Amino acid sequence: MEEQKKSSPTKKYIIGFAIVIIIALGLTGLFYYSKYFSANVTDKQEYLYIHTGAVYQDVYKTIQDEGIVKDTATFNWAAKNMKYTTRVKPGRYHLTNGMSNRRLINMLASGTQEPVTLNFHNLRLKEEFAGFVSKKIEPDSTSIIRLLDSGDFVKQYGFTTDNVYAMFIPNTYQLYWNNTPEKFFKRMYANYEKFWTPERKQKADAIGLSPIQVSILASITDAEALHDDEMPTIAGLYLNRLKKGMKLESDPTVIFAKHDFTIKRVLNRDLSFDSPYNTYLHTGLPPGPVMMPSVNALNSVLDYKKTDYIYMCAKSDFSGYHAFATNVADHLVNAHKFQQALNERNIKR
């Protein structure tokens, strides 16, 4: 009996100690769970943008300022313990409401960012293009324009500052937000080379044009055509004029030369505007595209429709289609009808 009485306090001590350990372990587990695994990311922002050259303090400030997490203190503690402070990677990171600190930090530290979808078409000027792209990726429009206007830079891809626009084939691209301007150009050129297959190059050669010249003619065709089904006929007409040594006399080239895209009616005084892009003054193709040609326009030049047309004029019904002619007399009749229709609608400019 005495031995049992002596052992009773010992058992109580052991049980009490075990309970303390269990509670301590539970509290420790709860502590680490709250720091690492509990939901912390809010729904205030869909993406976290980390700029090139950013350090941990920049990231932490963005997270604080934009309310990306509910508890910044636990994020900061987890980031330091997971050694993220020395593993910052730039990028555009997709946030999910309720993400834990651990999941967020693992994503940031591994650089697992979501690519940007870039889809461009029908842009007229390099400035427009640079502005549009800079809204989708990290480089600003100035850095993109700087390369577009750098003769030495574009020369390495076989272009000039006038015709470099031919390199950008309208398409849907997936690329990372933190691309440098140089990497962006490299990606665009890779797609350009992919587009210009041996078959397409052979077609271009058969009509006596280089791929760049095809793009220039396609840009004029695209600017003229409101309807895609008319593009092969328009392209064929211009090819007929080129073969005959005639001036293209394309209104969109005059509008581009003047950089006044509000013009709806090209007047005689516009035709004398001095510019290498004015095809009323200069024979042959202009030095570069007058807009970013669509893939349909490019293919329409390569697969142009063979006709004897050398003149065209917008139809007087404003359908967006053209009246084509093989001789001046018929063309003047078509032009008179359209001019009358413009006057009736009081379209002076």
Image (cartoon, helix red, strand yellow):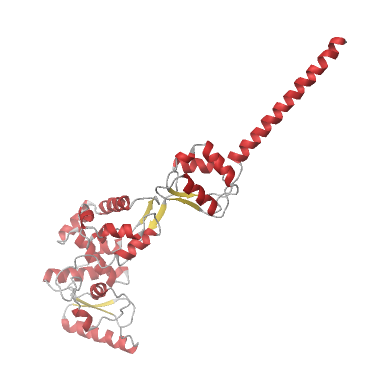
Choose between 228 and 37: the one closer to the eye. Answer: 37
- Is residue 18 shown above or below 202? above
In percent of the image, x 60 and y 40: which residue is there?
35
In the image, is 326 to the left or to the right of 12? Answer: left
* Quarter of the rendering containing residue 17: top right
Choose between 284 and 298: the one closer to the eye. Answer: 284
Q: Is residue 296 visible?
A: yes
Choose between 119 and 45: the one closer to the eye. Answer: 45
In percent of the image, x 51 and y 42: which residue is there?
105
The quarter of the image holding the C terminus is: bottom left
- Is residue 164 shown above or below 244? above
Q: Is residue 303 visible?
A: no
Where is residue 289 drawn, in percent x and y?
Answer: 24, 65
Where is residue 229 drawn, in percent x and y?
Answer: 30, 68
Where is residue 213 drawn, in percent x and y?
Answer: 19, 62
In percent of the image, x 18 and y 55: which residue is there?
202
